[in-house]
Amino acid sequence: MRGVLRSVFRINRASLVGTFVIVALATALLTATGAWLQAGWSADEFDSGMSMLSALASSFAGTTLIIVVFIVASTVATALRRRRREFALLRSIGATAAQVRQQITAEVSVVVLAAAPVGIVAGILLAPVLTPLLVSNGIVPEGFVLPFAQLSIIATLAVMFPTALVAGRLAARESARLTPTAAVQQSGFEPAMISKGRRIAAVATGVAGLLVAMIPFFFEGILGTASGASSVILLIVAVALAGPIIFSTVATRAAAATASEAQPALVLAAVNARGFSRRNAAVIVPLALLLSLGAVQSGVGIVSSAATGEQLEQALNADLIVSGAEGTAAPDLDTVEGVPGVTAVAQTSAVRASVRVETTGVEIPGLDALTWMPTAIRTITPVNTELLEPGVLEGSLDDLTDDGTIAVSRDTIALSGKGIGDSVDIRLPGEGDAIARIVAIYENSLGVGEYLMSPGDASAEPSSIALLVGTAPGSTADVRGILEADGALVLEPHEYSQAAQAVSGEEQGLSNVLLLALLAFIAVAALQSLATITSGRREEFELLRRSGATRPQLTSMVAVESLFVAAAALVLGVLAVLPALLGLGIGMLGNPLAAFDPVIFGGLAMMVAVLPMVTMVSVGWRSMTPQR
């Protein structure tokens, strides 16, 4: 087996090196993400910055894990698909299906064993590079040192090995189980039909993706925005499952339309696309994922920031919002009440806390910390809906004056089954665990927060304080002048919401950096798939040349195929992301175009269009050179 593997790696070194690179990059990405996730989980639950880090890392880790598994499986399958002729030859000379599977398992194991350590080291070295950006956003303190994340390494290996091995076995399953004669016959073409189970899975996943994309129409806030990316991934998975049928159907019609054309390149490209639908689908899916994921994640950021400002402005009925200037405390409530022209004052603040998530009631020793989620509880005193109205749907904020009460946002309890009169377990720093009774449910969660209490039930040191000030008619400007003269920062509601939106935009900048890293990984994977499949067509190009095709004609054929791939990826990517963008825009802001950024979308579309053209033509040109 050692000699066989040595020969295999020498002959197929190009595709195996490409797989090595993707596995190493995937391992590095997972290791770095896991390191920050472990740092957030192990920090003080009442540390506001580390709580934000935990939430950010958890969100990014979920998407990254799905994408990495998808891309690694696709890359391994693509690298093995180009070797169908080799597997057919092995079967024809007497190799059993078990022997072919054993060889594939050994190959994939060697690649992962070689790539994983490289990726782990790279991930450990690259993870601290993010520290300055986290410091500038106030998430981690100056001088923070990322601890060694051994759990991240273990988890990464636990993901990478099974993913690569299962993908390899599935990719070669068809060739391995065919009879030797059938294996040779099918090595020159790819059947477009897929199994019944795969068709059912494609339809079910597609329907699920559309349903998830509609969630923002019914649930605003966190639940609505979080559904955008998940719907895109579901739809892309549906495209991957049904890809051969989709591409074969389109290619068949294209071949029929070009049958009478006098352009050999156009005819050859259409026929090739029809005969190798699986090969083409394998390169289209990563490109479509690049476009759709980038568009929806940027759309989520745009809509979240805009909705935060809009909901906050709607909730603020005060004429002025007063806080301390940079480095100073906010004015005393009694002092502001004494300013001429002030009719009402309420103090609001954000308190770091933890809330217990729903459990099955089974206590697992050592894992109690995982049942508590860090959050921020907004406090207000006195409770005055004339100054702050978060859009109460049920109950009344007036009941917050009672001890042990809390108001919650609609999307926070949307999936919990809780309502008025039910309880929420909370944990405040220095005060231990407590139980609060729900007395009101409101809708403006992005603007106000997930929870609202009176400070008597959340008496921990607040992380921020602002005074909501109501003024007599015509006296707003005078009151503002007096307070600003005393050194306070005074803003009107629209100014305050714009400032909050700007802060949200700065935090979104960190998410954009993480998104760029993920998109870069997808782009490299797409590039690798394009190069692997195109370089594997050397024998096909040689046969066409011997049949009379010239090198310029073959180059033109590959160029037309690249246009076909780019167009298909753009169309499928747009179709996958469109429901999510429309749902986000209409559901959150009432504008179907609110989540659409033409600059970002145009840049992603340009990348999707250029990648296949440049890669396929350049690699194809080199593959057309006769081997000596």
Image: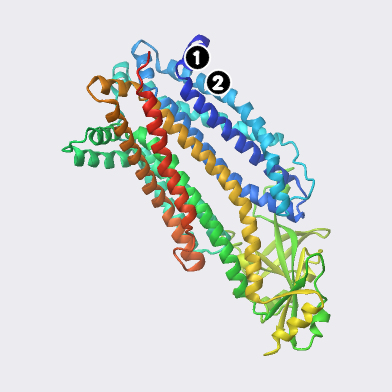
Q: Is residue 480 left or right of residue 169?
A: right
**Residue 269 lies in what quarter of the image?**
top left
Label at residue 110: 2
Give the residue type at disc 1.
Leu
**Residue 372 makes an appearance in the image:** no
Where is residue 569? Give x, y as percent: 39, 44
Quadrant where the C terminus sits is top left
User: Looking at the picture, does residue 360 appear above or below residue 34?
Assistant: below
Identity, as a three-letter code, of the amino acid under mark 2: Val
Front position in the image: 311 or 539: 539
* 1 or 2: tag closer to the N-terminus: 1
Residue picked out by circle 1: 5
Residue 340 x, y percent position in the rendering: 78, 88
Residue 286 visible = yes
Alpha carbons under labels 1 and 2: distance apart: 9 Å
Whole-percent x, y for residue 360 in the image? 63, 50
The image shows residue 27, relative to residue 380, as above or below, that is: above
Horizontal side, residue 599 vs residue 446: left or right: left
Hey, which residue is sitting farthest left in the picture?
Answer: 260
From the viewer's side, name the closer residue of 362 and 245: 245
Q: Secondary structure at mark 1?
A: helix
Q: Estimate how packed mark 1 is, as few (under 14), some (14 to 19) or many (20 or more) residues with alpha carbons within 10 Å.
A: some
Q: Quadrant of residue 241?
A: top left
SS label for mark 2: helix
Q: Residue at x 65, y 47 (%)?
A: 57
Q: Determine the residue positioned at 22% across, 38% down.
A: 255
The reply to whether callout 1 and callout 2 are in contact (CB within 8 Å) is yes
